[in-house]
Image (cartoon, grey):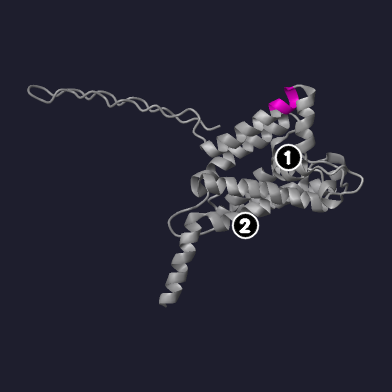
Amino acid sequence: MMIADIGSPVPRQPGGGGGGMPPSDPPPREEAPIFNAPRAVLGVVGLTALVFLVSHYANEEIANLLFAHLVLLPIRFLSTQNLAYDWTATLLSPLGHALLHANWMHLVVNMGLLLGFGTALTRRDGAAGFLVIYMASVLVGGALYVALAADPQAPVIGASGGVSGVMGAICQMGFAQIRGGPLAPAPFHRRGMAMTYSLSFFSINLVLAIFADQIGIAWQAHLGGFVAGFLLNMLLDKRQILARRERAASDQDE
């Protein structure tokens, strides 16, 4: 969570001698908000934290109901045999699984990353752009998990696909070079850093894929989400859209 510094009051100017103007009072101090992450990001974090608390600390019946309808289970989409078909779970789980987390560490890591990267993304693509990229990345990451899961009855939960998509969008900004200054926040405003981070992300998830049976982390959701966020940001980033239009107009003039 980013904390905004609160500025110190402007000191009183010393008065001049004789008939000089009297010293003016300092301007009123503006109180900056403590939590300066965008509302869209705070909303997603708050909803995810609420569902986590209910799913882990509410009575067992409510917790079981949440897990039954929000867990992403590949076999629901691959076969209707040997499983009681549940249309509610089929409709809710592709997005809903991002609201569930296994434990506090799982929740804190995902939401901490979302606060950092999501804030930067929202300030460039707007709240709507952030939400579209986040939810689309959750869906694509979940779809890739369903398609590549070694065990169709192994469920997946967590916001990692959406968080990875937001990371991918920030990295895409680092690759984009347009007039008018860098798109991505530091240190991703340098193309080399965006490249290094992207290669590291894919390398780590390759290792996770190799040891998937031992580790139990859904690398498919990470990769699917990252690629989805990377590609979507090219279509949603207003400065990149404007730059493409300017280039097209310049080419027509020539």
Q: How many marks?
A: 2
Q: Which image quarter is the N terminus in?
A: top right
Magenta span of residues: 53-58
Residue highlighted by disc 2:
231
The residues tagged by marks 1 and 2 sit, at their Cα atoms, a distance apart of: 23 Å
In the depicted structure, whether residue 248 falls above or below residue 194: below
| Residue at the image position 77 percent from the left and 41 percent from the top | 89
Q: x and y percent of residue 219 in the render?
A: 77, 47
Q: Which tag is nearer the camera, tag 1 or tag 2? A: 1
Label located before the other in sequence (1 or 2): 1
Q: Quadrant of residue 176?
A: bottom right
What's the residue type where badge 2 is placed? Leu
Q: Main secondary structure of the magenta part?
A: helix
Residue 66, percent from left and from top: 75, 32
The picture quadrant where one finds residue 5 is top left
State the image coordinates of residue 214 (x, y, percent, origin top left).
Answer: 87, 40
Near mark 2 (Cα within 10 A), the count class, few <14, some 14-19 or many ≥20, is some
Residue at figure coordinates x 47%, y 56% from the top left: 239
On residue 97, the disc is: 1
